[in-house]
Image (tube, rainbow, N blue to C red):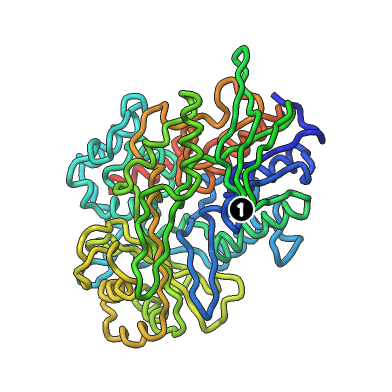
Amino acid sequence: MIDSGRTTKAYLVGGGIAALAAAAFLIRDGEVPGENIRILEQMPLPGGSLDGRGTPDGAYVTRGGRMLEDEAYTCLWNLLESIPTLDDESVSVRQEIIDFNREWPTDARARLIDRDHRIVDASRLGLDTRDRLELARLLVTPESAIGARRIDEVFSEHFFATNFWAMWRTTFAFQNWHSAIELKRYFLRFLQEFPRIHTLSGVRRTRLNQYDSVVRPLTRWLLERGVRIEHGVTVTDVDFTEQNGIRRARRIHLRRESGRETVELADLDLAFITLGSMTADAAHGGDDTVPELVRDKRDGSWTLWETLSRKAPDFGRPAVFNGNVAEAAWESFTLTMRSPALLERIEKFSGNAAGTGALMTFKDSPWLMSVVVPRPPHFEGQPEDVFTLWGYGLIMDAPGEYTGKAMAECTGREILTELLGQLGFEDIAEEVHATTTVTTVMMPYITSQFARRSVHDRPRVIPHGARNFAFLGQYVEIPEDVVFTVEYSVRGAMHAVHRLLGLDLPVPPVHHALADPAAVLSALRTALG
């Protein structure tokens, strides 16, 4: 391990939340000077998948939304306790989240909607004895015995028709063909959510979208301490050496608009390399356009991992995760509304004020469409008379009930038509269409982290023998933790920094719901109810 000190220089490949968190931990925990830290990012903005942008005159858009949780997000909270908000240096981002959720607690009253536009009693999970037995069997089966099995290989057909599965899969974006191991980890990590899955009252949200509420404050904190965030930089390769079982990163090859460069790493220098990207090659569409489904890996994130994976057998197998776009892709959409008509109708229908509901899932929708209305403003500078809504569809190739077209073939206006039909709000369609801009986003790898995998397909955060490099992001292996969460990226970053710097500081343990008897009893009562 490398002793922390002012001579260490750190190079972080990628500017997503994992790299930003690693930079913060290097400074806060390792006392590495900010001016010794360089973040190399190909995109024009930091934050990676935690995006949020737009203007009231044009359109707002987020590719996704993150629902946080008190018990499970220990590393994220540890980080955000150290970062002040943009508005008040005396208030941490963590405290802002606590205050916001105290004022606007989540208590969804319309979690599931049926084909007749009626609110389903979602507290009735619909699990039968066989479902419960299969669920219990999955929880006690070791991951080594589960292997690369699909979810629909461990549950019977009835399970997939239950209200429980409709809510669980849309809350966390599971497909029936995804990894049973990942589902087991989610059950163990979020067992405390079983009794409140129908209200999602355990959800914690940021005051604004995650880019404005998390990425911008964190980025400012890093820049104030001298960290250099270099945009327009694509890292194409990293050279490693190995001697007597000790491996070191020695050279970083990168490409800018001005040409190619090589960064030489000294013995005390560190490299943190983000592998892959769930939002790589995301393509946008609008009111009258359909977003492209990109399949040829134009983004450099996957290309870098593919290059590195050929250097050592324990650097992972990216093809497992990027090799089947059809099983990983789905599409999201953001509505920018300049009339309160749709918002007010949803509030009246659901019984939830904006920001107090959760995902409303149209359980009989061919697209399995879900939407959520955030508390306005959801974007920095959003006017009082402009409102937003975010939604997504898990199934992209089935004909819509009101459009007759697959979601992947629809323009933004057609997706809006399908949404209004699912809600039964056709009577306000003319006003809503005239005052709404729809931005769609097609993401070919958005659930690729859930791909069926073996134990060797994801590399360790710090591979065996590594002395000055670590891997970051959603495609590393962190035992017992769950991918597709901000927590996973931040935990990997903390682990990497503490280990490489040899810091005698604890990483908050992974939350184990089974260690809490009250949570287990409550979940058991819910499952048996």
What residue is shown at x 59% (from left), y 33% (from top)? 238
- Amino acid type, label 1: Glu
What residue is shown at x 73% (from left), y 65% (from top)? 88
State which quadrant residue 347 falls in. Answer: bottom left
Q: Is residue 328 left or right of residue 51?
A: left
Above or below 357: residue 447: above
Image quadrant in which the N terminus is located: top right
Q: Give percent across and percent down for residue 245.
A: 59, 15
Q: Is residue 312 left or right of residue 363?
A: right
Q: Is residue 441 left or right of residue 127?
A: right
Q: Is residue 76 visible?
A: no
Q: Is residue 351 left or right of residue 396?
A: right
Above or below 302: residue 8: above
Say which of 348 and 236 sits in front: 236
Q: Residue furthest right?
A: 6
Above or below 240: residue 6: below
Q: Is residue 459 visible?
A: yes
| Residue neighbourhood size for the residue with mark 1, other residues' Cα within 10 Å, grouped as few (<14), some (14–19), many (≥20) | few
Q: Give percent across and percent down for residue 304.
A: 51, 39
Q: Give percent across and percent down for residue 445.
A: 39, 49
Label 1 sits on residue: 257
Query: At numbered mark 1, what does the secondary structure look like: helix, strand or loop?
Result: loop
Say which of 194 and 153 sits in front: 153
Say which of 507 and 454 sits in front: 454
